[in-house]
């Protein structure tokens, strides 16, 4: 059915190009995989290779496929070996990486008389032996580099910087041109990488500054905030690309980790009274301070007790106008907070106060305070948290940066109150925001001349 030329072409692709059984069949369109396995095994080169003598690249590919979930039997059929060999390669690769698959059979070996060496002259023989010696030296130095950078690396995937290290180790013994040719490295690339290695890490100082800022921010700042802080450093401002900051934070593992927990408590107790209209309609923007306020209540589960926070947020710049923390979500908490907020108003200021439909904002005391001080009430639709999204967003930032992933064991209510007060002061005075031109709410108001 297939001519000798067809068989030779298929088997040559397998032995000379390092292609798998499946790839050979896919390229040529013939024969079946099982037939090609038989052709490979009947070829003299298969017998000469000896049982288990496969190239390092072949072993690595087979091990990776087996570890990825492919059937060892299917992999073995393509490679032309036994399934037990594939399993053994996979175990070695998983435990020791590529180095575990290296053996004497993978290294270049001196030529034998049967290879035609007897027909070579003395100079040619010396040159061939020198080439083999160089190959062995390259393999030896490559293994050293791999041991430094980790056993999971593949020799075929050495970076130019790693290749440069190999060249530096062998250039005095074999000459620069010979080693560069063996490593497949251009002379210009070699000198560039050598200069980079000699110069060291040019971002070493920047890395340290980024680490300090990340810790200073409580390990919650992202790369944009860190980038802005570097530029705003009064003592030593630094102009650097956002991409560089992002890359360095990724390399150093400086990633904010937020633990989001489902909301287990709700202030909604049913329709106690007629709800006012939603005057905000999800437009949480204000042209001036004390024009639009938001409020809500959130719960903190502590070590043996719970407490509730009720703040008033100004939509002009996100400032926390007033807040109360209470061990009980009662009327005294919400009404006391509202009175504290009203005390900050100037003559003629009568903001809209927007909330959800929680019971705190339906009680007679709350309604009376709003009426006495000219506050216009506004409420979200029933069970619609996006209608008060800005307040929910504030709680999200607060808990991500201050509460989640912190150890609160043994922290009393009074200690928690002190720490929360310190954070909210930071939030108003020193926590910068992109929407405010990388200023805090207090700094932003000062820049506009709204406060002294």
Image (spheres, rainbow, N blue to C red):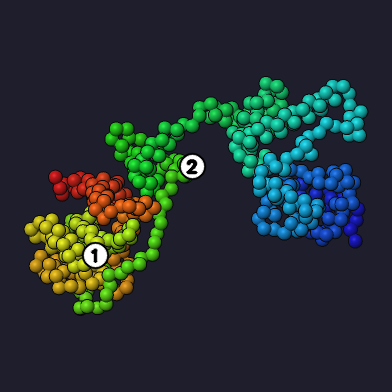
Does residue 322 appear to the left or right of 402 in the view shown? left
What is the crowding at mark 2: few (fewer than 14 residues within 10 Å), some, or many (at least 20)? few
Query: Residue drawn 13% across and 67% down?
Result: 370
Of 257 and 179, the residue lying toward us: 257
Q: Which mark is residue 437?
A: none
Quadrant of the image containing the C terminus: top left
Residue contact at pointers 1 and 2, CB within 8 angstroms: no
Query: Residue drawn 31% across and 49% down?
Result: 434
Q: Nearer the viewer, mark 1 or mark 2?
A: 1
Query: Residue drawn 21% across and 67% down?
Result: 330
Of 166 and 22, the residue lying toward us: 166
Taking the image as drawn, is residue 303 in sight?
A: yes
Query: Residue drawn 81% across and 27% down?
Result: 129
Residue that mark 1 sits on: 328
- Is residue 409 positioned above or below 243 on the image? below
- Is residue 53 positioned above or below 359 on the image? above
Residue that mark 2 sits on: 251
Secondary structure, mark 2, is helix
Q: CA distance from mark 1 to mark 2?
A: 45 Å
Quadrant of the image containing the N terminus: bottom right
- Is residue 439 positioned above or below 383 on the image? above
Residue 240: give x, y in percent of width and height.
Answer: 39, 38
Which residue is situated farthest in the left direction here? 347
Secondary structure, mark 1, is loop
Taking the image as drawn, is residue 181 in sight?
A: no
Residue 440: give x, y in percent of width and height.
Answer: 25, 47
């Amino acid at each position: 059915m297939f001519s000798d030329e067809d068989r030779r072409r298929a088997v040559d692709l397998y032995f000379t190009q390092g292609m798998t059984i499946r790839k050979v069949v896919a390229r040529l369109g013939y024969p079946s995989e099982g037939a090609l396995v038989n052709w490979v095994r009947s070829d003299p080169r298969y017998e000469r290779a000896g049982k288990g003598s496969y190239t390092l690249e072949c072993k690595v590919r087979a091990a990776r496929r087996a570890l990825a979930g492919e059937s060892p039997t299917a992999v073995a059929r393509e490679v032309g070996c036994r399934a037990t060999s594939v399993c053994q390669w996979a175990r070695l690769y998983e435990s020791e990486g590529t180095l575990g698959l290296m053996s004497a059979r993978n290294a270049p070996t001196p030529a034998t008389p049967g290879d035609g060496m007897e027909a070579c002259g003395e100079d040619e023989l010396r040159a061939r032996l020198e080439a083999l010696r160089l190959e062995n030296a390259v393999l030896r130095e490559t293994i050293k580099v791999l041991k430094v950078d980790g056993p999971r690396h593949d020799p075929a995937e050495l970076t130019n910087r790693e290749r440069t290290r190999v060249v530096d180790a062998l250039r005095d013994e074999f000459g620069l041109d010979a080693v560069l040719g063996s490593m497949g490295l251009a002379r210009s690339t070699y000198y560039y990488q050598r200069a980079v290695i000699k110069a060291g890490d040019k971002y070493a100082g920047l890395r340290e500054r980024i680490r300090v800022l990340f810790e200073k921010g409580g390990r919650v700042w992202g790369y944009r905030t860190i980038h802005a802080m570097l530029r705003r450093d009064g003592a030593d401002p630094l102009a650097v690309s956002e991409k560089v900051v992002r890359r360095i934070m990724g390399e150093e593992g400086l990633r904010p980790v937020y633990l989001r927990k489902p909301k287990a408590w709700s202030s909604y107790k049913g329709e106690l009274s007629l709800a006012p209209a939603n005057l905000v309609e999800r437009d949480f923007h204000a042209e001036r301070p004390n024009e639009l306020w938001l409020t809500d209540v959130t719960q903190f589960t502590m070590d043996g007790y719970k407490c509730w926070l009720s703040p008033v947020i100004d939509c002009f710049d996100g400032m926390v106008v007033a807040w109360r923390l209470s061990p009980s979500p009662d009327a005294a908490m919400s009404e006391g907070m509202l009175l504290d907020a009203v005390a900050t108003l100037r003559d003629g200021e009568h903001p809209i106060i927007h909330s959800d439909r929680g019971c705190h904002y339906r009680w007679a005391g709350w309604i009376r305070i709003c009426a006495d001080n000219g506050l216009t009430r506004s409420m979200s639709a029933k069970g619609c948290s996006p209608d008060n999204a800005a307040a929910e967003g504030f709680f999200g930032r607060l808990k991500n940066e201050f509460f989640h992933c912190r150890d609160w064991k043994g922290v009393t209510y009074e200690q928690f109150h002190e720490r929360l007060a310190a954070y909210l002061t930071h939030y108003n005075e020193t926590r910068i925001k992109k929407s405010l031109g990388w200023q805090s709410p207090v700094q932003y108001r000062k820049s506009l001349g709204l406060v002294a």
